[in-house]
Amino acid sequence: MSGRTEGGAKERHAGDDGRWPTARIVAFSCAAFALAPTAAFAHASDRGYVLLLPTGYYLFGGAVVVAASFLALFFVPQTTLEKLAAWRLPLFAVPDRLRFWTSLVSFLILCALIAAGIFGSRDPLSNPLPLTVWTLLWIGLTLVQGAFGNLWRWIDPWYAPLKLAGAVIPKEAGLKYPEWLGYWPAVILFAAFAWFELIDVAPDDPYRLALAVGGYWMLAFAIMLVVGHDVWSGRGEFLSVFFRMVSRFGIFHSATDGNRRPVSLCLPGAKLWAEQPLPLSVTLFLLLALASVSFDGFSKTFLWLGANGINPLEFPGRSALQAINTLGLAGMFAALAGVFLICVSLGERLAGEGSARRAAGLLVWSIVPIALAYHFSHYLTAFLVNAQYAAVALSDPFGLGWNLFGTAYMPVSAGIVMGSEQAVLIWNAQAFAIIGGHVLAVLVAHGLASRLHAGSRGALFSQVPLTLLMIGYTVFGLWLLSTPTAG
């Protein structure tokens, strides 16, 4: 959603001179994306300023921190790390039957958002559908999933409609899902959606987006009627696959226990230590998720545009870059996947034992904290502004003068991301997330590698190439945050 941080709200948005309470904004935003079941990802990543800070120090410092964390882990007893990863604090239990009702509410909200996309304002800043899809779902819900756990399970918009359909249709299952398909449908759908998000000429047009969201929901619903909800949401429906995987980093753990789901507290990333090796299709799925966010930032840099003969100061728009960016997105994914698999394979050779394919399927879980860190850093400034527009639009979804949540006349301020003080604060938050995400990735990789190799020497050598990749990606991420961009 290009340029969303530069303009003001329309007249009715700025009609109130009073300040809006911060707590109310935060509470409203959290509630909105928690109930937003749209089937699309976001594109709201543009930065409103160029950072003029000593970025070289950050690049070098970030690399040193990641490298030092790798070395420090070998002075910590493995049993201590395993105990920390296994620690759980029981909290409460949630009745599993509640899932039907939360899913039903989510589905009804989805229907309302699609209707708003069709019949409401054509302005993406005034229509709640693109703001919910791109800002509250893709940015907000992804971060909530990563921070806390699998909220998506409770707001999945297909679960309740399929239960209702089961009362009319004898049973969901009709055909057995072919095992050879694996997770490839999710990979293909994610790739198509990444293209729509990053390269399509108008992904935030409310009417086109409404057709895309509605069409995708119906397609997934039809497939679930045939093969079953759990099967398709587990392997083919890319939102469910993506949200479930990033939720493994969250601090809340839950599992089915009869008709209840006990919830316990754990340390961030602890659940990743117990994961099993993934098949190649899911390994590539996670790498594709990271590559798409990385290319979203890289595609706007002066380096990329200049290399393709584009004057960054005369940005021609998306339509002129579709072919170039399509190749660029594919190239970014191929490069990341290739380097990752080479590093894992080289690590196994250095260790002198183990299967490279099994190691890749297990160590790819260490990509989750990196992907979340990139997500936070890349979309932070856009979220801070566009969440305000979403609060306004959701109060008056059809442009009829409603004020459902008392936020329709809330003033929208882009100043929250402008100014020298804000620039320093935001840059440090983004840099800390990038560096911290890679440090946690090294920690997760260490725990997973220790399961692949019995001896500490083998685990050490197997991680060296992957750690070098993480150091390089840390520098790349910090560079993306600081380099000039266009568009």
Image (tube, rainbow, N blue to C red):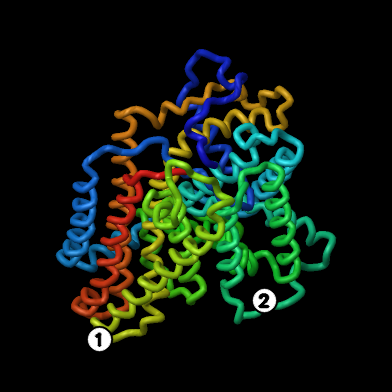
Quick one: which residue is furthest to the bottom in this view? Answer: 353
Q: Which residue is mark 1?
A: 352
**Residue 71: x %, y % from top left:** 17, 64
Q: Is residue 296 left or right of residue 396?
A: left
Q: Which residue is mark 2?
A: 177
What residue sits 37% from the left and 57% below the top? 370
Q: Which sits earlier in the primary sequence, circle 1 or circle 2?
A: 2
- For the question of whether residue 487 can be seen, the reply is yes
Query: Where on the picture, by quarter, is residue 67?
Result: bottom left
Q: Which residue is nearer to you in this view: 60 or 110?
A: 60
**Badge 1 density bin: few <14, some 14–19, many ≥20, Cα 10 Å:** few
**Residue 157: x %, y % from top left:** 67, 52
Could you say whether the residue bearing mark 2 is in a helix, strand or loop?
A: loop
The three-letter code of the residue at mark 1 reads Gly
What residue sits 56% from the left and 67% below the top? 187
Alpha carbon separation for disc pair 1 and 2: 38 Å
**Residue 236: x %, y % from top left:** 61, 67
Q: Tags 1 and 2 in contact by the CB under 8 Å rule?
A: no
**Residue 475: x %, y % from top left:** 28, 55
The three-letter code of the residue at mark 2 reads Tyr
What residue sits 38% from the left and 75% below the top? 341
Label for residue 302? none
Query: Where on the picture, by quarter, is residue 128?
Result: top right
Q: Which residue is nearer to you in this view: 113 or 106?
A: 113
Could you say whether the residue bearing mark 1 is in a helix, strand or loop?
A: loop
Quick one: which residue is furthest to the left in this view? Answer: 75
Q: Is residue 375 left or right of residue 184?
A: left
